[in-house]
Image (tube, rainbow, N blue to C red):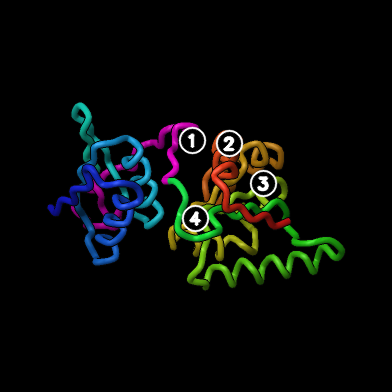
Amino acid sequence: MKEIDVRGRPCPQPVLMVLEAIKQGETAFRVLLDNAEAVQNVLRAVQSQGYRGQTTRQGDRWQITVTSGTPGAEEPVPTPPEKPVAEAPSCGRPSVATRTLVIQSESLGHGSVELGKRILAQLLNTLALSERRPQYIVLVNTGAKLAAEGSDLVEPLRDLEQKGVLVLVCGTCINYFGLEGKLAVGRPTNAYEVLNLMLDGGVITWG
């Protein structure tokens, strides 16, 4: 099985190397790492591509066995549980100006709610096709409903997720609107993670 040695590589190089292997058609490979931050970033990256990752640790060294998760793939393994969101690291500022897009409503702008929904849909669908994308999309307040089952905007959000954008849904909002177990895209987040993303800068807010 192919091995990808990312030990000593600064973020985001480990993720980029793993995504390149997936792009080249590798269906099963091992990743060698030397820090917990890279482990979490690589796990989320492979999971966003529909792959599975199993982590083992020996001292200050980690190994992730990655498989495609399709029938007949080598050494199929279950996806390990994520570490708590509060422990999730950030790779730092990306090269693009907009790092985080915060969507705080189901409708964009003031005035006609129906028109605002159409505008938001147009922008998200266009963003999904664009070469310029944020690193994170954070859904808060009624914006959390955009990631729930039955939402018309699940597909563009899922498309963005498949292209490497991390979709984060406000956990308090999930509970408030009764969306537990109903997310069709993205994962829950909390105030700690959202606050740190905002403090990192490069934030645009829609709502």
Q: Earlier in the sequence, mark 3 or mark 4?
A: 4
**Percent x, y for residue 201?**
57, 48
Residue drawn at x 15%, y 50% as measured from the top left: 3
20 vs 98, left or right, is left
Disc ID at residue 190: 2
Does 161 lie within the magenta span? no
Label 4: which secondary element: loop
Amino acid type, label 4: Gln
Disc ID at residue 135: 4
What distance separates the C-alpha of mark 1 from that of mark 2?
7 Å
Badge 3 is on which residue?
A: 140
Residue drawn at x 21%, y 34% as measured from the top left: 61
Label 2: which secondary element: loop
Mark in the foreground, 2 or 4: 4
In this picture, which residue range is highlighted in magenta?
A: 65-91
Badge 1 is on which residue?
A: 85
What distance separates the C-alpha of mark 3 from that of mark 1?
16 Å
| Proximity of marks 3 and 1: CB atoms separated by less than 8 Å | no
The crowd level at tag 2 (other Cα within 10 Å; few <14, some 14-19, many 20+) is some
What distance separates the C-alpha of mark 3 from that of mark 4?
17 Å
